[in-house]
């Protein structure tokens, strides 16, 4: 634990409201799926991956980079930790020919992922189960590749999250995740993910800055703010207030944040 405390951003306090129940509500709201996808499409334009409808900020660039960097073999096993509705990993599985295991702490997300799997891969090539970032419930060395899209920062112990990915990877397997880096004094901020990855037992292969990350996220916040009345009418006052608060709180900090895609490998 001492080592973790000495690495900035490695161990952080829990975030208020970040619970499986909150994600159950988000993943289970069909109206939210519709309006949020439409607003994201408006903000991201041609870079928005239609049909994938990611919960986070994955774009066409992100999907293609996951495919090229994970190097998962056809017929191999890809694990998606914190998969949500699994649009990202189902797309990657389809493109690579890999079998998919998705893990998420939201039972609603797991059920929704299982429903949509047949749209992307043949029956029997994808399965989903309950688990979380530090305890997937999967056996040792079961994966040829592991991905985590826009979720590792939800872990309060980020080293433990990397260590879990390392545990389930076969020797030589790769782990790729997206996040952001900043050094602005916030309690959850990570200025550099490399020490966290290395403390978790993996070797950093690549750090890739996500092109136009801050620009695109800022544009999404602008779209949210311009459509708050519709959000309020469709999703309710609480959802509209949460979106406004995020846009007003995070938006001004974007110039100090860098979106990154990390690739790491087990020896």
Image (tube, helix red, strand yellow):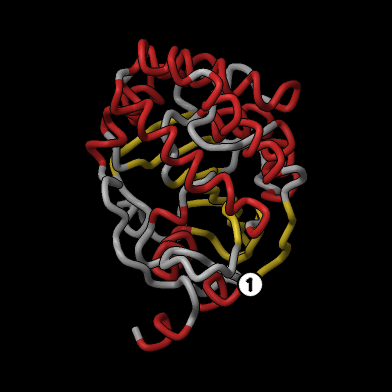
- Residue 60, by quadrant, is top right
Residue drawn at 41 percent across, 39 percent down: 245
Return the residue nearer the eye: 255 or 208. 255
| Picture layout, residue 185 above or below residue 52 | below
Return the residue nearer the eye: 218 or 165. 218
| Picture layout, residue 18 above or below residue 113 | below
Q: How many marks?
A: 1
Residue drawn at 58 percent across, 69 percent down: 183
Q: Where is residue 58 in the image (x, y as percent from the top left)?
A: 61, 36
Residue drawn at 40 percent across, 60 percent down: 140
Mark 1, residue position: 203
Q: Position of residue 265 (x, y in %)?
A: 63, 65
Helix, strand or loop status at disc 1 = strand
Classify the position of the C terminus by image quarter.
bottom right
Q: Is residue 172 visible?
A: yes
Q: Where is residue 80 in the image (x, y as percent from the top left)?
A: 48, 43
Residue drawn at 38 percent across, 12 percent down: 31
Classify the position of the N terminus by image quarter.
bottom left
- Residue at the far bottom in the pictured view: 2
- Residue 59, by quadrant, is top right
């Amino acid at each position: 634990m001492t080592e973790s405390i000495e690495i900035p951003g490695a161990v952080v306090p829990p975030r208020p409201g970040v619970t499986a129940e909150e994600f159950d509500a988000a993943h289970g709201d069909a109206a939210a799926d519709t309006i949020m996808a439409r607003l994201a499409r408006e903000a991201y334009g041609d870079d928005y991956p239609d049909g994938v409808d990611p919960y986070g900020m994955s774009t066409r660039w992100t999907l293609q980079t996951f495919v090229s960097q994970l190097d998962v073999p056809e017929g191999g096993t890809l694990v998606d930790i914190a998969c949500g509705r699994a649009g990202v990993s189902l797309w990657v599985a389809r493109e690579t020919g890999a079998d998919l295991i998705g893990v998420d702490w939201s039972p609603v997300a797991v059920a929704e992922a299982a429903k949509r799997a047949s749209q992307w891969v043949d029956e029997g090539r994808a399965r989903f189960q309950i688990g979380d970032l530090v305890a997937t419930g999967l056996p040792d060395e079961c994966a040829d590749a592991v991905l985590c899209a826009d979720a590792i920062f939800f872990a309060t112990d980020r080293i433990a999250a990397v260590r879990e990915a390392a545990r389930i990877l076969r020797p030589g397997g790769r782990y790729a995740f997206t996040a952001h880096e900043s050094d602005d004094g916030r309690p959850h901020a990570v200025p550099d993910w490399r020490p966290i990855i290395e403390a978790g037992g993996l070797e950093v292969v690549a750090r890739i800055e996500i092109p136009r990350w801050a620009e695109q996220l800022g544009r999404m916040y602008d779209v949210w703010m311009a459509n708050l009345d519709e959000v309020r009418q469709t999703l309710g006052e609480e959802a509209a207030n949460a979106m406004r608060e995020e846009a007003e709180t995070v938006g001004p900090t974007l110039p100090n944040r860098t979106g990154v895609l990390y690739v790491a490998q087990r020896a």
